[in-house]
Image: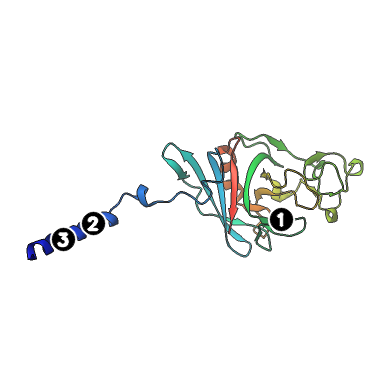
């Protein structure tokens, strides 16, 4: 009986040691967005860390599953001055939670390269925020006094020639262009402060990410 007890104890020790030394791949769970991005192979994951602060992690799907991209983990980010919201709307000053496409890139600086379409913007480039406009929540090009929509900031329209848009990637929020449900959500260069609902990171890091991005990439935002 004593011998049986010793063997039983030894077996239990081996089992515990087996758990402690299990390969990391067996114990590592998939990232939270894994089942929500369809066939996407590139994801920017933004996680709120309190207030208008967040971190951005860059992920790529490989033959071995989702893997963090070296140099793209824990990137400091700024979000809306009022944090995040699952119910985005114009003027909320909150970054929309959810999964969104990354549709194209733009900036006041020349195209840094990468797989996304890029538009270099100037003084005649606008993001139409006029809820009564048929081109609401789209980029438009026109002289200020000739634009067929309200170009005032109070109407939600933005002129895109500003320092924070040295480089930017358009998030596919409210692609149906429902009036009042928000627009002009980008990943853009940071000035160090909170945003009106966008995600902002260091410009040099953003350029590196833009050069890596390809069509089909997505952004996943959560608290």
Give the CA distance from mark 3 to mark 2. 11 Å
Side of 26 relative to 86 (left or right): left
User: Which residue corresponds to mark 2?
Assistant: 15
Of label 2 and label 1, which has the lower sequence position? 2
Residue 44 against residue 195 in the figure, above or below: above
User: Which residue corresponds to mark 3?
Assistant: 8
Give the CA distance from mark 2 to mark 1. 50 Å
Q: Quadrant of residue 126?
A: top right
Camera-side mark, 1 or 3: 3
User: Which residue corresponds to mark 1?
Assistant: 88
Give the CA distance from mark 1 to mark 3. 59 Å
Q: Nearer the viewer, residue 146 or 180?
A: 180
At 81% from the left and 40% from the top, the residue drawn is: 140
Q: Nearer the viewer, residue 111 or 155?
A: 155
At 58% from the left and 38% from the top, the residue drawn is: 213
Residue 58 against residue 51 in the figure, above or below: above
- Please state the horizontal and vertical placement of residue 69, each as a whole percent of the image: 48, 44
Q: Quadrant of residue 125?
A: top right
Q: Secondary structure at mark 2?
A: helix
At 45% from the left and 44% from the top, the residue drawn is: 67
Camera-side mark, 3 or 2: 3
């Amino acid at each position: 009986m004593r011998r049986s007890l010793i063997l039983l104890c030894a077996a239990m020790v081996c089992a515990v040691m087996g758990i402690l030394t299990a390969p990391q791949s067996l114990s590592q769970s998939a990232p939270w967005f894994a089942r929500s991005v369809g066939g996407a192979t590139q994801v920017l994951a933004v996680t709120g860390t309190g207030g208008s602060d967040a971190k951005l992690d860059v992920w790529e799907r490989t033959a071995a599953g989702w893997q963090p991209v070296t140099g793209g983990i824990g990137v400091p980010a700024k979000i809306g001055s009022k944090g995040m919201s699952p119910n985005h709307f114009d003027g909320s000053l909150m970054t929309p939670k959810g999964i969104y496409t990354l549709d194209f890139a733009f900036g006041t600086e020349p195209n840094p390269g990468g797989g996304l379409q890029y538009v270099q913007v100037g003084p005649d480039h606008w993001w139409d925020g006029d809820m009564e406009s048929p081109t609401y929540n789209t980029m438009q090009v026109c002289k200020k006094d000739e634009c067929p929509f309200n170009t005032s900031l109070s109407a939600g329209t933005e002129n895109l020639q500003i320092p924070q848009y040295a480089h930017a990637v358009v998030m596919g929020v409210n692609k149906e262009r429902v009036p009042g449900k928000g627009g002009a959500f980008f990943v853009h260069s940071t000035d160090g402060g909170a945003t009106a609902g966008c995600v902002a990171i260091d410009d040099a890091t953003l350029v590196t990410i833009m050069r890596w991005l390809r069509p089909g990439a997505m952004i996943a935002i959560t608290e």
